[in-house]
Each structure stands twice: as C-alpha cells, then as structure tokens.
Amino acid sequence: MGLIFCFVTSYKGFFAERLERLRSGVITLLDSSKIGPSINDRSSGVIFIGASYPWGTLSPEAQVLQSTLYNEYKKLAEIGKSFLSDRALPQNKDRFIRECDPILELTKQEHCTWYKNIGEAKKALNESFNKQVEAVNSMHGKLGSGMVLIPDTNVIIRSPHFHMYKVKEKCTILMQPTVLAELDSLKVFHRNENVRKKVSAAIKELKYLRSKGQIADGVKVTENVTVCARAIEPRFDNKPSWLDPQNKDDRFLASCFEVSSEFPDSEISILTLDFNVQNKAEISLLPFIDPEEQGII
C-alpha cells in the first residue's frame, strides 16, 4: 500500500529521522563557518563578560543554507513541543525544550559565541541533538506498534462502511471528535439534501458500531480493521502556532497531533481526499494517504 506522503515507520521514528536530517544540515553549515579570536584584549584591561568569540561572515551559498535550516528547525521545534506535550515524561519534555535555543543559536550565528572553534561548536550541537533524539525515543504509547488511520469528514461521508476498507495489515481507524461533531452539524444544516442523507447514513453506521461494543475502546469490524472513537476535543495551548482553533481543518489536524503523541510507536496516517487538508498536513509533517488513489475505499 503506497503512501502519498511516504511514512513507513512509527511517528517517533519519523520525527527522530527529521531531527537527524537537520543535524546533518547544521553540521554542514558549521563546516562552512568560522569563529574568530576572542574580542577580549587582555592588554587593555577591559574584559567583556559573556560570549566573546565572533562568528565570521558566511558565503552567499552558506547564508541560503543557514536561512533554510533555521526556519526548518524552528518549525520542527514547534512540532516537537506539541508531540512531547502530554505524553512524555516531564524531564524528557523539558530536556527537548531546553536544547531548542542552543541549536537555533548555533544555526543563526549572531554576534558572538562561547565556543573557541568550530570543533567545540559541533560537539555542543551534537550533544543538543542527542538529548532531543533521546527525549523523542523515550515516548511510548498504549497501543504499541501498528497502523493508525485517521479519516477526515469527507472520507467518512464518501465511504462510511469500514468493513469494506481494503487494507493489507491490521489497523485501527480512529474517529476524531472534530469529525463526529462536523457530521452532526452537516446532518442538520447542510443546504444539500443529498449530502444530508449521506451524512445521516454515515452516522447510522457509526451508531451500529456502537451497538456492537464500546467504540471508545475499539470495535473490530474485520480481521484487519478495528474502529475506535476519541471523545476529547483538541487543546491549542501547546500546538504549532500556524493552526487556527477557529478553522475546522486546523482543529482536525490539532487532534491528529494529539494522536501522534498518544500512539508514538504506531504508523499514523491521515485519510483525506481534500487537497487543502493534504497541503496543511504536509506543512505540519503529518503523514497522509489519499484513500481513493491508493484503493482503500
């Protein structure tokens, strides 16, 4: 089963790989960087307290790399803080957060540094990235490994019969509260009667599943497919700044961030037909599948 957004490992494995990719990029940047002698002149009798080793001027090519890495890491750091927000041990979450500024400082290279040479700077960078990777790898979820598929509202309306989903391995289909609330609203308020009927049919199917067991704990519908519904609305106090709590797609993605934190050992993918949701998911580093293109529905 091919992925539109390639994702073949657990979310924490995926996130750790992105950290390693950025580590490699910043090391390349440091290899192109220079650190000058201390600005302290001992013969003058005036000593500056603080970082005193000035960064050299980067080449134009290195400046482009620097800008790219700085912005990519800032985004990744926001996602990491969200990923570790609720499920990580407090000491590991704090360790990840503490190392964000040192990495950004070694990437931005403004003013002066504490490090006397590039070798010291690279050693400090590796130590910071090591601590962040260790914090991410410390995450463990209640589901263990396995695939988690998160359908958006349009997918549920398009194909509400989960026993007909064509998947080649065991998976949990996770219904988000944002999707369930939108279905309830569309059933009553959508101006198109045909859409209202489709939504009503989807809700009827979900109610049927509830009659078969505790859907909050998971109801098995085929040998490979279990359907589970989450009930808690997403929080936004620890989500990436580009997500708007007033936007329904962003609320859905915020819920998906919480799933990644709840099930860090699982292969997580959003099921969506909506190009805008796919675009936002890609920006947010949330894996997605177009279920029609992949033949799932």
Image (spheres, helix red, strand yellow):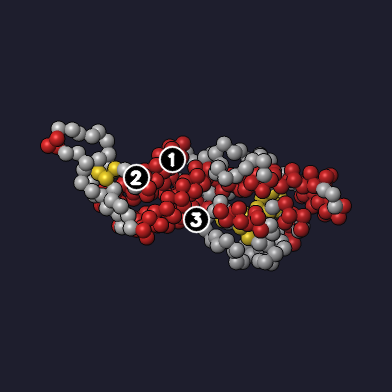
Residue tagged by mark 1? 97
Give the amino acid type for the residue marked by disc 1 in the picture: Ile
Give me the C-alpha separation between circle 2 and circle 3: 31 Å
* Mark 3, secondary structure of its residue: helix
Marks 1 and 3 in Cβ contact (< 8 Å)? no
Q: Residue 82: in sight, yes or no?
A: yes
Callout 2 amino acid: Glu
Q: Residue 76: x and y, percent?
A: 48, 49
Q: Which residue is mark 3?
A: 14
Element at label 1: helix
Give the crowd class for mark 1: few <14, some 14-19, many >=20 residues within 10 Å: some
Q: How far apart are the two marked residues, 1 and 3, measured between alpha carbons?
A: 19 Å
Are there few (<14), some (14-19), or many (20+) residues within 10 Å of tag 3? some
Mark 2 and mark 3 in contact? Answer it, CB < 8 Å: no
Three-letter amino acid code of the residue under disc 3 = Phe
Q: Residue at x 66, y 66 (%)?
A: 294
